[in-house]
Amino acid sequence: METITKTEAKRLSPGLLAFYGDSVYELYVRRYVVSGGDRPSAELHNTSIKMARASFQAAAFEKLIPLLTEEESDILRRGRNATGLNAPKSSNSAEYHKATAVEALFGYLSLTGQNERIEELFAEITKGTIE
């Protein structure tokens, strides 16, 4: 996939960035889960689901804040403040907004070709996660 410029990416809505970032984040989660070794598929699935939940991503939001550049912080803020979000029953509104922010950041970084930065941030999110 071709990357876009940071200026072009900043023009995209936070919802669009989060929509795309959700798939980017999920791919990193699945890659992380399988890196833990061969396990039953149900266990792989359950771990993936745990890491994709809004509550886990909200905790990731808090871990990321001190690590972000000003530009990344702006994307995170825009994602958190996105309108039209309806939290699922499994989370509250604050968690869901933070999860959307993380997804928007991952979408922005991926679309602008900053995959090494995604790797760095995801490594911080997942420190000590796999049992």
Image: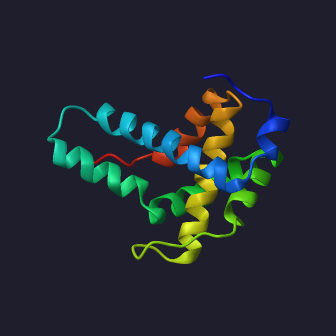
The answer to whether 96 is drawn above or below residue 18 in the figure is below
Horizontal placement of 75 versus 17: left or right?
right
The answer to whether 120 is drawn above or below residue 96 in the figure is above
**Residue at 69% from the left image edge and 69% from the top image edge:** 83
Horizontal placement of 1 versus 3: left or right?
left
The answer to whether 105 is drawn above or below residue 36 in the figure is below
**Residue at 67% from the left image edge and 29% from the top image edge:** 114
Horizontal placement of 130 versus 98: left or right?
left
Q: Residue furthest left?
A: 40
Q: Quadrant of the N terminus?
A: top right
Q: Nearer the viewer, residue 118 or 8?
A: 8
Locate residue 5, reporting x and y percent. Answer: 80, 30
The image quarter in which residue 86 lies: bottom right
Locate residue 103, reporting x and y percent. Answer: 58, 51
Locate residue 93, reporting x and y percent. Answer: 56, 76
Locate residue 34, reporting x and y percent. Answer: 30, 34
Query: In this figure, which colouring scheme has been used for the structure?
Result: rainbow
Total numbered circles: 0
Q: Nearer the viewer, residue 19 or 67?
A: 19
